[in-house]
Amino acid sequence: MRKFLVVLDDSRECLNAMRFAAMRAAHTGGGVTILSVIAPEEFNHWIGVGEIMRAEARERIQAHFDVFAKWMRDKQGVDPELVIREGEAVAEIMAQINEDPEIGVLVLGAGSDKAGPGPLVSQMTRSSGDLSVPVTIVPGELSKERLEAIT
């Protein structure tokens, strides 16, 4: 089964990327893998404090995933899987793609403010020549209706 890999982060544009991945998966009989990457600098503290912070980050990610997963199951009939990795975002995305041969498309959400599409989209487009899958960049300002029409 072909899976759409979508990155879960705290950005506003993440929502449209999730919607796009779920709708495309529903229309093509595919699946969705939601990847969240915990940056290593979040845990540069004493060992005990770092472990508590790591557990809190995982709980926060799980809570966000649960919301998206419920919507995907209820509205799109897609049961996503969650993968949490620790490290630098681009390296972990590339590793996930390389480790899961069913991933067929990477879906990213692009910001629409004056700062540009966002650091992840900028970094991934620079690394896109090394990817083994195509990248779909979903504009963050795209309406839900337009997303439904496109997918």
Image (tube, helix red, strand yellow):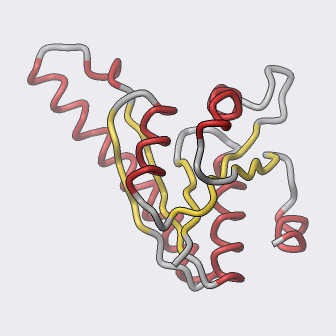
Image x and y of residue 13, in percent:
71, 44
Residue 31 place in picture, x, y as percent: 53, 74
Q: Is residue 17 left or right of residue 114?
A: left
Question: Which residue is located at x 63 percent, y 59 percent?
Answer: 105
x and y, in percent, of residue 87 in the image:
36, 30
Residue placed at 87% from the left, 59% from the top?
143
Name the side, left or right, on which 21 lies relative to 86: right
- Of residues 83 and 90, which is closer to you in this image? 90
Judge whether 20 appears above or below 113 on screen: below
Q: Residue at x 42, y 38 (%)?
A: 92
**Which residue corresponds to the image point at 26% horizontal and 21% vertical from the top-left?**
43
Q: Quadrant of residue 37?
A: top left
Q: In the displayed structure, would residue 93 be above or below residue 77?
A: above
Say if 116 sits above or below 29 in the image: above
Residue 39: x %, y % from top left? 39, 27
User: Count the marks: how many?
Assistant: 0
User: Considering depth in this image, is 96 or 25 the residue closer to the camera?
Assistant: 96
**Residue in the foreground of this view, choosing between 1 and 10:** 1
Quadrant (top left/top right/bottom left/bottom right) for the C terminus: bottom right
- Please state if 32 lies on the left or on the right of 42 as rendered: right
**Residue 134 versus residue 25: which sits nearer the camera?**
134
